[in-house]
Image (cartoon, rainbow, N blue to C red):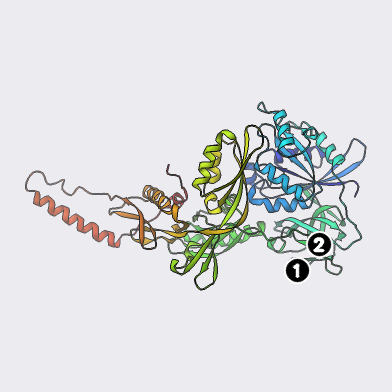
Amino acid sequence: MKNIRNFSIIAHIDHGKSTLSDRLIQSSKIISDRDFKDQILDSMEIERERGITIKSQTVCLPYTARDGKTYVLNLIDTPGHVDFTYEVSRALASCEGALLLIDASQGVEAQTLANLYLAMEHNLDIIPVINKIDLPSADIDRVKGQIGSDLGLDPESAILASAKEGTGITDILEAVVQHLPPPAGDPEAPLQALIFDSHYDPFRGTVVHFRIKEGTLRTGDRIRFMSNGATYRVEEVGVFQIVRIPKKSLSAGEVGYMIAGIKTVSDTRSGDTVTLDNRPCAAPLPGFKEAKPVVFSSIYPVASDDYEDLAVAMEKLKLNDAALVYEKDSSAALGFGFRCGFLGLLHLEVVQERLEREYDLSLILTAPSVRYRLEMNDGEELTIDNPALYPDPTLIAQALEPFIKASIIIPDRYMGAVMKLCMERRGINKNYQYLTSDRLEMIFELPLAEVIYDFYDRLKSLTQGYGSFDYELIDYRETDLVKLDFLINGERVDALSMLIHRDNAVNRARIACDKLKDEIPRQMFKIAIQGAIGGKIISRSTVSPFRKDVTAKCYGGDISRKRKLLEKQKKGKKRMKMVGQVMLPQSAFLAVLKTDSD
């Protein structure tokens, strides 16, 4: 155990985590140069394309240090996005130390601070690393100043590196060996292992990633999951070295995987404790909680014939993504589909892209919403996330919506623009403080429903890309909630309905009606598009009809003949409107999601 080091790399998005992982793997020579590819730990196509890590990975690196000893370094890679904070916290609970990566040109950002606090909660030893020193815009002295003032770490202990060029990689490995403590634990004690991730193998079932805190796990042992009491027999244990390397046993301090014929990923919950069935440990490891979805949306196939294919695709995707929650749903306008719960908007986008790419489906998503709590007049409490389930407003005593605490770090010249944006979104300014002479951290309390649309995009464009954003859910607060419906020619389209704050309803309805007007193709009759709250119409747009010039053949002569022809045309259009149905294109559903008026 003296020669084992378990560590993680934490950073803000796009500070070079995956590139540094690549260099560490290359330096350990566990994979030949011919088989190596960039972002080797990012196995999904979307991860490579977007340059983000969605699924955490583990790799076991042998390293011979300058003192001549050979060490086993277990690198537990973590996702970088705020949606996956719980997965990051479980990965950190499996480590003794962390490399805190900071971009030499961007400096300390919101998630740098958030991830540092997460690591400190787990009492990890932190090694600051200043990455991207090869960039022309790199300002190492400024970043060192931020490490001292913003993070409270020793700036002189920061290692200078360029993961792209391979500079400073040996210094990082030496720092891991010298400064991070070896794991503690008794190999003879009852087994106590922490699950921090899992993935699905189509041939072997669920592959569980875990770190053993106490005891030893051998092939053939019968294990028990402490959160749900399920028992399994271990078929294989081993370590990850890009590929799976089986071993006879793993003991305290080691990180690896096990295969035990587990059929679904959702049975293995991140943060759960594994123990032996015949010799259980006294108590589970602390910190376990179920991943709860915060954003909800309905997914429908464009062609109703594809519903069966979508059902199969959702089932397969659920095998690889335990955080995805879904149930059957139906809509009068769109037919059958699924109501899904996501960890955040990025998670929603990733699921949508994977369904469309990997399973070749064309999908329509309804407007994302959050989960509201409704206290009824009779004392009953309802939780709803679907506008279709919204009850009669006269029966509701009080509506509550989720609030978040948002931490926004920006250069101070953007303070006014960001404050205006947050105030528009019903934000409450709690605090702001200068981190350096020109950088500012602003703390706002915002309704989650106002953040899930386009808040992050607006923040990035207002601050020219310099703003960074991190949030956590805090509580539920009273709100004035209304259900906004859209009527096309007097017909209510349930898939376009949304739950919204009363103050924003008129503006949102007006913008949505204008966008629908642009998307719905013209017919031979007039199409009325209306936004309504209950029976009250609050906005309207009209798609003007095509019109045949029936008076073209009348030249000169009496006006009454022309009038007679126009009256006849008017009656015909009226009759056509009675039987005419409006086909809504797919783009109409997407247009309603766009809140800006451009």
Secondary structure of residue under mark 2: loop
Q: Residues within 10 Å of mark 2 (few under 14, many from 20)?
A: some
Q: Quadrant of the C terminus?
A: top left
Q: Residue at x 70, y 57 (%)?
A: 200
Front-lying residue, 152 or 5: 152
Residue 84 image offset from top left, x and y in percent: 66, 51
Q: Is residue 368 above or below residue 141?
A: below
The residue that disc 1 covers is 230
Front-lying residue, 35 or 131: 131
Q: Is residue 230 left or right of residue 566?
A: right
Q: Amino acid at mark 2?
A: Glu
Q: Residues within 10 Å of mark 1 (few under 14, many from 20)?
A: some
Q: Residue 235: which disc?
A: 2
Q: Amino acid at mark 1?
A: Ala
Q: Residue at x 65, y 27 (%)?
A: 137
* Residue 454 visible within the image: yes
Secondary structure of residue under mark 1: loop
User: Which circle's residue, 2 or 1, is located before the other in the chain?
Assistant: 1
* Residue 34 visible within the image: no
Residue 440 image offset from top left, x and y in percent: 62, 37
Q: How many marks?
A: 2
